[in-house]
Amino acid sequence: MLLGGSVVGAYMGEQKWAETAAAMGYAASTCPLPRHADREEAMALMRAAGEHGVVIGEVGVWKNTLSPDDRERADNMFFAKEQLALAEYMGVACCVNIAGARGPQWDGAYADNYARDTYALIVDSVREIIDAVKPRRAFYTLEPMPWMHPDSPDDYLQMIKDVDRAQFAVHMDFVNMLSSPKRILYSENFIADCFKKLAPFIKSVHIKDAAMDAHAMPAQIVECAPGQGKLNYAHILSLIDRLLPRDTPVLLEHMLTNEEYLRAMTYVKGIAGQLQIPVR
């Protein structure tokens, strides 16, 4: 696996970014380019990353392509196509977004997120994005979320079938699918099910941890850094090593400082070392 994460802070150009990523021991990282970066900027970043042994693991969209505001939705669809085209140009396999939300908060929890018409709109939107760009190297993927499609491995498999495009694939974020006490309590079984069913389609992985307050009513599940929750990282790393290609980007996320990323990297690499799992 190519272990890495994000570089915290404003983008200061490709050389500074690549030096920082390499100094942190990253083998892979998220694409840091600002919105509407041109191809000259993209190639400069790829050269700098290559010189420092860092792979760009994913190009993010992070826009609501299901916005109920027609103008906002059109703008976000255009941006998603731009980002997929950027990933294709750079040769980055994973272009990632969430499906989107049917409300004012781009990633919010709304009942309409699960409406039949919303599912149809997701399928049509993904098809439109892929068909407009016609990528050959890049894949459009949707990060699972607790309160929108896809929210389980079976839901993702059904979406792959319904979208019916070769360049639609999987971004694996198993923590985002740990959305109930039962899934937390049986997390080893659930995470194994995620990887076994979706492994042939996975282009990138987010790794983090999760914890549940055993006394709070109703249940409270929180995300945290690897090693600070209840997940069995020996089990998780073994699944990744056994089921995914060795060049799969495996990325930490949602930390506030580079020091927090380094602590999480140290923990994950320590578990991998104990198991003799190769990590770059």
Image (cartoon, rainbow, N blue to C red):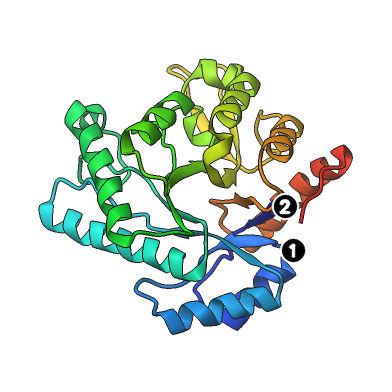
Q: Position of residue 170 (x, y in %)?
A: 48, 42
Image quarter hosting the C terminus: bottom right
Q: Position of residue 159 (x, y in %)?
A: 36, 33
Would residue 151 be visible to someone looking at this image? no
Which residue is labeled 1 in the image? 25
Is disc 1 surrounded by few (<14), some (14 to 19) or many (20+) residues within 10 Å?
some
- Type of amino acid at the residue the image marks with label 1: Gly
Classify 33 as above or below 180: below
Which residue is labeled 2 in the image? 265
Q: Position of residue 130 (x, y in %)?
A: 33, 53
First of labels 1, 2 by sequence position: 1
- Type of amino acid at the residue the image marks with label 2: Met
Q: Residue drawn 20% across and 41% down?
A: 103
Q: Residue drawn 69% across and 78% down?
A: 51
Q: Nearer the viewer, residue 88 or 36?
A: 88
Classify 43 as above or below 118: below
Classify 230 as above or below 219: below
Q: Position of residue 243 (x, y in %)?
A: 68, 36
The answer to which image quadrant residue 206 occupies is top right
Would residue 39 be visible to someone looking at this image? yes
Classify 154 as above or below 77: above
Q: Secondary structure at mark 1?
A: loop
Along the horizontal axis of the image, is 125 left or right of 27? left
Q: Residue drawn 73% across and 30% down?
A: 235
> Mark 1 near mark 2, Cβ–Cβ under 8 Å?
yes
Mark-to-mark CA distance, 1 and 2 = 8 Å
Q: Residue drawn 32% across and 59% down?
A: 80
Q: Nearer the viewer, residue 110 or 245?
A: 245
Say which mark, if any, is on residue 38.
none
